[in-house]
Image: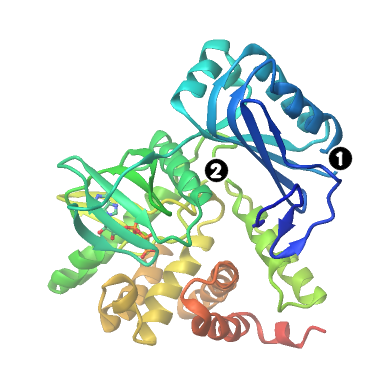
Amino acid sequence: MGEVWSNGQCRCKGRAVATTDFKAQEDDGMKMDVMVDGARMTVKISGRLDVHTAPVLDELIEHQLANIKELMLDCGGVDSVSSVGLRAILKAHQKMKDSHGRLLLKNVTKSTADVFEVTGLDRILHCERKPRSMSVAGLQMIAKGANGECYKVDDETVLKLYFDYVEEAYAVKEKELAKQAFVAGVPTPISFDVVACGDRRGILYEMIRADTLSKYIETNVDRFDEVVELYVGFCKKIHAIVPAPNTFPDAVTLACGYVDACDFFNERQRAFLKDRLVRTERHGTLIHWDLHPSNIMRDGENLCLIDMGDMAVGTPFFDLGQIKHVLHYCGGMGLCHTFIGLSDAIAVRVWKKFVASYFGHPAPDALAVIEENIDFYRAIKNVFLYLCRSGGETMRSRRKEFIFQMLPKEFAQLR
Ligand SMILES: Nc1ncnc2c1ncn2[C@@H]1O[C@H](COP(=O)(O)OP(=O)(O)OP(=O)(O)O)[C@@H](O)[C@H]1O
Ligand SMILES: [Mg+2]
């Protein structure tokens, strides 16, 4: 992420960025701050965008977008937009389209969004609304997850509030994926708005009055087999859902990107992983990618899925890898209770029963082949978790070690 600029000089991660000699501009009634980070340019506009001020934006669009692939217009400070201002924005849209890049409008206030709607531009432009501000003072915290807290807002609504290191873009993505999942038929709470609480971002969700499936498993050990069957049946239902085309990202494409971004693989190791990934049978069916029993809530006989930020389409093995990791690995390490509130010994038993049942109780040698395949996808998910530093720095270095342990022995020898 870039830093900022003063006197028209752009800075990124503390170093001066080689940009053209564009200067931060201030015109009567409008101010534009420009930040460049590699191929991404952010332009923060404050004031009026009209016949007097739009030429400043026009000038930038005309001369400064040569190597830019993503242009973000932060419209949070825009007071008003006239037709001339709209034309400047349209010009930026066309310019980015011509260079196979994209234009995003961020922090769009209600009044600006109304103008886009009235003119029909909302159908062409990619706009993100300015998150509504709210405070959690006086709200009851009802749960704590790995990435934030969950507050009761009223009898129908909860706020899932991320810690401050989670970017707004992630909250927007989770909200959108939750909506798409709902439309595709996944039993999941309605996601309303992304909101801002100071530096933190959150999502307002329909409140589910239920306990997690982890808690249900824990309190029903006398009906262990039946409860695990319920879990397996729910996962299989999710894995049978075919969403509309292009509504979810493709897991293989994402996974290849994670492998490319991972700094500790050499080229042959990268090629090995990507080759196996692209040979994965393409599934147009849903995966959740974090389908552990604390991301499932049980309301009477109904199970409901939450925490939708990593959903994609792909083989169920992507999900099975993460389920095995949480239950079998974390359970074996004594970490499952801390992570998902399910006691470690029970978690290990759940995995054994789960995998046998999911695959129709195969013979031991067939099960061993299945588990080897599951371990491959488990390693891939851990590459992602390594990249996003999930679990902190100590976990990060341990994760690197066990990624190699999860992969076939010859993988480490590839030079
Ligand atoms: N819609 C909802 N209604 C009621 N409770 C909810 C809802 N969404 C989340 N919760 C509660 O908040 C907890 C954390 O939510 P969630 O799993 O989405 O957050 P997270 O921080 O991403 O969690 P983790 O990364 O630990 O899985 C849930 O286990 C649940 O108890
Ligand atoms: Mg969760």
The disc labelled 1 sits on which kind of residue?
A: Ala
Please name the residue shown 49% across and 49% down the image.
168
Q: Position of residue 166 (x, y in %)?
A: 48, 58
Q: Which residue in the protein does label 1 denote?
A: 66
Q: Quadrant of residue 403?
A: bottom right
Q: Quadrant of residue 381?
A: bottom right
Sequence-first tag of 2 and 1: 1
Q: In this orientation, does residue 279 appear?
A: no
Please name the residue shown 52% across and 62% down the image.
317
Q: In this orientation, does residue 412 appear?
A: yes
Q: Quadrant of residue 277?
A: bottom right
Vertical side of 394 occupied by 300: above or below: above
- Which numbered marker is on residue 253? none
Q: Position of residue 237 (x, y in %)?
A: 38, 48
Q: Position of residue 3 (x, y in %)?
A: 65, 57
The disc labelled 2 sits on which kind of residue?
A: Phe
Vertical side of 115 occupied by 359: above or below: below
**Quick one: SS at disc 1?**
loop
Q: Which residue in the protein does label 2 denote?
A: 248
Image-based side of 263 in relation to 114, left or right: right
Q: CA distance from mark 2 to mark 1?
A: 31 Å
Mark 1: few/some/many CA within 10 Å (<14, 14-19, 20+): some
